[in-house]
Image (cartoon, rainbow, N blue to C red):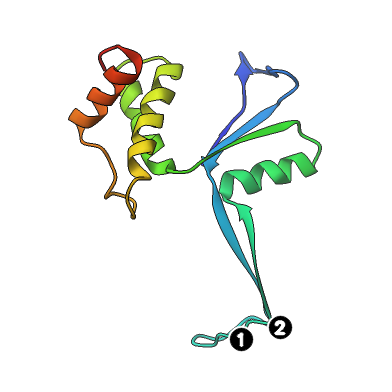
């Protein structure tokens, strides 16, 4: 989860009225209603519901409820996106280019089941970056 607060030399710098932006994986939160705190091994569930969520989304929702102007960008393939984004930073790319590298890594990751099976090799990542943006990574 990343919650970004745009600060400029100690003062809040809002963009279009937005004070806080949440960036994170888009998850499904499972909520269970039980009569009491269960003992080990018990599985008494009266009701189960699924809601969109994730730590960044939940944080942004809470801040919005408190009156903070918020925005949220959810990511599917979030770990791969973060890895690609950080790789772009390590290569000295700007934030927009880092987002592009993260996007490519995330596109690869969602093609297969599991967190690691779909990750691109470095060669695949650099080739796809060159194909999409006509630049070398």
Residue situated in front as seen by the camera: 13 or 102? 102
Percent of width and height locating residue 82: 40, 35
Q: CA distance from mark 1 to mark 2?
A: 8 Å
Secondary element at tag 1 = loop
Which residue is pictured at 64% across the width and 17% down the height? 10
Residue 63 sits in quarter? top right
Neighbor class of circle 1 (other Cα within 10 Å; few <14, some 14-19, many 20+) is some
In the rendered image, which quarter is residue 16 located in?
A: top right
Report which residue position mark 2 lands on.
35
Residue 9 x, y percent position in the rendering: 61, 13
Q: Quadrant of the C terminus?
A: top left
Residue visible at 62% across and 53% down? 52
Indicate the secondary structure of the residue bearing disc 2: loop
The crowd level at tag 2 (other Cα within 10 Å; few <14, some 14-19, many 20+) is few
Provide residue 86's location: percent of width, then percent of height: 36, 29
Q: Are marks 1 and 2 in contact (CB under 8 Å)?
A: yes
**Which residue in the protein does label 1 denote?**
44
The residue drawn where x is 61% and y is 86% is 44
Q: Of discs 1 and 2, which sits in the foreground? A: 1
């Amino acid at each position: 989860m990343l919650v970004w607060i745009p600060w400029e030399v100690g003062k809040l710098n809002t963009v279009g009225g937005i004070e806080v932006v949440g960036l994170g994986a888009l998850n499904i939160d499972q909520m269970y209603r039980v009569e009491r705190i269960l003992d080990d091994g018990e599985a008494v569930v009266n009701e189960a519901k699924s809601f969109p969520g994730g730590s960044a989304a939940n944080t942004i929702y809470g801040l919005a409820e408190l009156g903070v102007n918020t925005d949220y960008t959810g990511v599917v393939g979030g770990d791969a996106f973060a890895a690609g984004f950080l790789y772009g930073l390590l290569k000295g790319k700007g934030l927009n280019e880092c987002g592009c590298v993260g996007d490519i890594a995330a596109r690869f990751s969602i093609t297969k089941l599991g967190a690691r099976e779909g990750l691109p090799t470095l060669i695949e990542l650099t080739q796809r970056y060159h194909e999409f943006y006509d630049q070398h990574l």
